[in-house]
Amino acid sequence: MRILVIFTTFLFGYNAIAQTKIIKIEDSATIIDYTYLNELTNKYKAQEKKDYFAQDDIQSFVEFDPSMLPDFSDEYFATKVYSMPSSIRLGMTRDVAQTIRYFGYKKREYMTKMLTNSQAYFPLFESLLEKRGMPKELKYLAIVESALNPNARSKAGATGLWQFMSATAREEGLMVNKFIDERKDIFKSTEFALDFLQKLYNNYGDWLLALAAYNSGPGNVNKAIRKSGGYDYWSIRHHLPRETRQYVPNFIAIMYVMVNHEEFMLYPSKSSLNFKNIVQCQIDQEVSINHIADLCKADIEEIKAYNPALIQEYIPNLCLPYQINLPIDKAKILNKNKDFLAEDPYLDFLKPNYYQPKPLDHLADETTTSSETASES
């Protein structure tokens, strides 16, 4: 373990008190799996057909030559990590510092996208976390999980912002079928994720252990605790699955770059989506998304962006009543036009048509078959 001693000054009224702070750079580093990191940073690419996160205005920063940036030392990162205001007890290792460099220097487009997309999602996350009394820094976990892409899907099939398997989602009451996948629902999936994280924290009393259990499951964390004899993430780390050894460092590195993005000359573009400023409208009849868009004078791709849980182009009877997410102004227009929902010109073309043969058709088939058989004989 390397120890860095720094001096900090705190002002209380007119009195300045100098204090010594010990900064620890743990030796529990592990080899960085760049394949896993690249898989993570590729998740943001599968976005909506229409990109609501334009970045033309900050393209020069995306293309900024990282060799022109300062070569920050591990000690510098350690000082900044331990000074970040956080109710989560963060740690620092050499691979955390290396992962910070990976995101800050090498993945500039990715981090620009995360800074931009966070404007759409973080206000909602912060509001929900504050209501529960949970650390607001947990919002960064959605970047580690899905790159803030509600349509993200892992190789194992975990889906959505918070990456749930279908069986787990169904057990918790989320709808997952060929029409609706509520793992992609921004509100329901976030509430479920926060419920699960709170349960894990209640079990361990430590947020980093809760994050490790979120990734690998409580069973693996409990096993690592028994094998190591420790009871904090850094003590049990080398007894965890390989991906989980890197999971918490990724969380700390992402949090660092998001908080200190200006150090790396990274800046967000403006997002036109904001999930905190939408309302839900109840739909009680089968209707197409196109028709809803027409009635509330909205862009259909905007409606899809706010409702990623909708897999098909229409809401079927099977899923009614359904709460659709709309910007406040569009919701007001739709409520005024709800009487016209039944006059849907698109629905019949979108619903699958199954051919059911009539009795005469069946007879004709038999006759044809008989004739063909007779001629062949």
Image (cartoon, grey):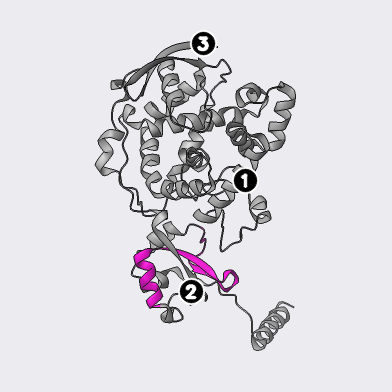
**Percent x, y for residue 70?**
32, 19
Q: How many marks?
A: 3
- Tell me the element at label 1: helix
Specify start and end residues of the magenta stretch as a single range.
309-337
Residue under pointer 2: 287
Residue 280 drawn at (x, y percent):
46, 65
Q: Spot the residue most to the front.
A: 14
Proximity of marks 3 and 1: CB atoms separated by less than 8 Å: no
Q: Residue at x 67, y 82 (%)?
A: 365
Name the quadrant containing residue 239. Answer: top right
Of residues 285 and 280, the one nearer the viewer is: 280
Q: Which mark is residue 2?
A: 3
Q: Sort mark 3 into few (<14), some (14-19) or many (20+) by Cα contacts within 10 Å.
A: few
Does the magenta segment cover residue 189?
no
Q: Vertically, is 173 above or below 100?
A: below
For mark 3, give the secondary structure.
Answer: strand
Magenta stretch contains residue 327: yes
Left-right relation of 31 to 18: right
The answer for how far apart the CA atoms under marks 3 and 1 are is 35 Å
**Is residue 97 shown to the viewer in this render?**
yes
